Every structure is written in structure tokens, then in C-alpha cells.
Amino acid sequence: MNKTWTKVDDFFCDSFALQDKALKQVLLNCEKEGLPQIQISACQGQFLHLLAKVQGAGRILEIGTLGGYSSIFLARALKENGVLYTIEALEKHSSVAAKNFEICGVSDKIKLINNDATQALYDLIDKGCEPFDLIFIDADKDNYPIYLELVLKLTRPGSVIVADNIVRDGELINKESQDPCVQGVRKYCQILSENKQTETTGIQTVGPKGYDGFTLTIVSRADN
Ligand code: DHB
Ligand code: MG
């Protein structure tokens, strides 16, 4: 990986004290438990944290908990009595995340749903769940199109949707790609490009995890 990108990320992380002791322990737990080391960086975590604060978020939805690292940045940004729903398909990841939430003292703000995300989203829609202020999609990339279709039903005008890992080393623009993940993120962008109720941008990122990027979407007023 590009050494300068990593050093600059470390510089931001140290300068702005982005990781406290508890968050460092969370990363150690994830590694010790053998979880894939694909969580967002501290800088990206803090970006989500700040975005949630800018948004004044009281209700956040995350798809793809992994060990709960990003969830903690989000939960810590919630306004008083706010709640974070986070969905994780794998039992092992869920149990590591639950322990990490305890360590960080955020368990009482988090509803951890251990289920297939498509099913979990249908369940939330069926039970008339209130809309979310902020939604972070960071799960299996091939299913991003269906996640988008479903999370849009859990939004209100002004809701924000962030989707991670959209750029994938630039493979996003490879029309011929046979990789289901690339096809998933391409379709995700295509759906948004045709959706009149949303406004979106894409931001490319570099850092310890290489070259990637995310999309940021706001749900506009229905009469826009
Ligand atoms: C992968 C998934 C992620 O969410 C990520 O941020 C990086 C990599 C992956 O599945 O390889
Ligand atoms: Mg990701």
C-alpha cells in the first residue's frame, strides 16, 4: 500500500486524537477473533461521526456491522436518546460486535440485528419502522442495489445515505467487469442516477486500505 497515504492517515489520526483506548481495544478484539481486517479507517469513522452530528441524527441505520468499529463512531454521535440499528448476517461478527459495544459503553444505544440484511430490512419496513436520519451501507457489495431499494423506504426528505467501497480501485468504471461486487456498485450508482428524489455525489478516497471511495446521497423533498 502507498506509504504516504498511510502516514498522512496516521498523522490525522494522531493530530485529532481519533481513537481512544476503547476503540484501540475494539480493533485488537476484531483481530484476535480473526475477523477480516476490512473495517473503515479511523479518519473515515470520524467523518461518519461528524456527518451524523451535522445531520443532528437521532436515528441511524447501518448495514454490515462487522466487529462494530464504524457503529461505535456513529453511536457516539447520536443525539440524546438516539438509536443506531446495525444489521449483521454473521453470528460470529455479531457476538464480537456486541462485546465491543459493551467495552465502549454504547450497548444501550444500539439495536444489533443478527440477520440477513435483506430480510432484516423487509422486517423493519413491514413493522412500519420510523425513518432514519442517516444510513450507512457497508456490507456485501453485490447486494447494494436491493439494499438501496429497501433503505429508500426507510427515509424521509433530508435523510442521508452513505455507501462504502464504491470505487474499488477504479473498477467502478469497468463496464466489462464480471466481478459481482463491481456489478453491484455500478448498478447502485445507476439506480441513483435515475432517481429523481435523490441528489448524490461520489468521493474518491486513499488511505491505509488503498484506493476506494464512497457515495453520499441526500433524499430530497418529494416535490423537488
Ligand atoms: C471489503 C469490504 C469492505 O466493506 C471494505 O471496506 C473493504 C473490503 C471486502 O469485502 O473485501
Ligand atoms: Mg467497507
Image: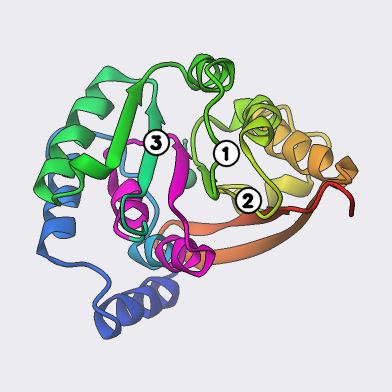
Q: Quadrant of the C terminus?
A: bottom right
Residue drawn 27% across and 28% down? 93
Q: Residue at horizontal 43%, vertical 52%?
A: 58
On screen, residue 50 above or below 73: below
Residue 213 position by quadrant: bottom right
Type of amino acid at the residue the image marks with label 3: Tyr
Q: Left or right of 125: which side holds 62?
A: left
Location of mark 2 (residue): 159
Decide: few, some or many residues near mark 2? Use Cα within 10 Å; few <14, some 14-19, many ≥20: many
Q: Position of residue 70 (x, y in %)?
A: 35, 50
Mark 1 residue CB less than 8 A from any atom of ligand 2: no
Q: Position of residue 21 (x, y in %)?
A: 10, 63
Picture residue at 63% right of the left edge, 47% below the top: 166
Q: CA distance from mark 2 to mark 3?
A: 15 Å
Point out residue 35 in the picture as x, y percentages from the top left corner.
25, 34
The amino acid pointed to by label 2 is: Ser
The residue carrying pointer 3 sits among few (fewer than 14), some (14 to 19) or many (20 or more) residues within 10 Å by Cα, namely: some
Q: CA distance from mark 2 to mark 1?
A: 8 Å
Magenta residue span: 47-76
Asked whether the viewer can see residue 90, the reply is yes
The residue identified by callout 1 is 131
- The residue mark sitting in front, 1 or 3, is 1
Give percent across and percent down for residue 117.
49, 22
Residue nearer the viewer, 197 or 35: 197
Q: What residue sits right under mark 3 in the picture?
A: 85
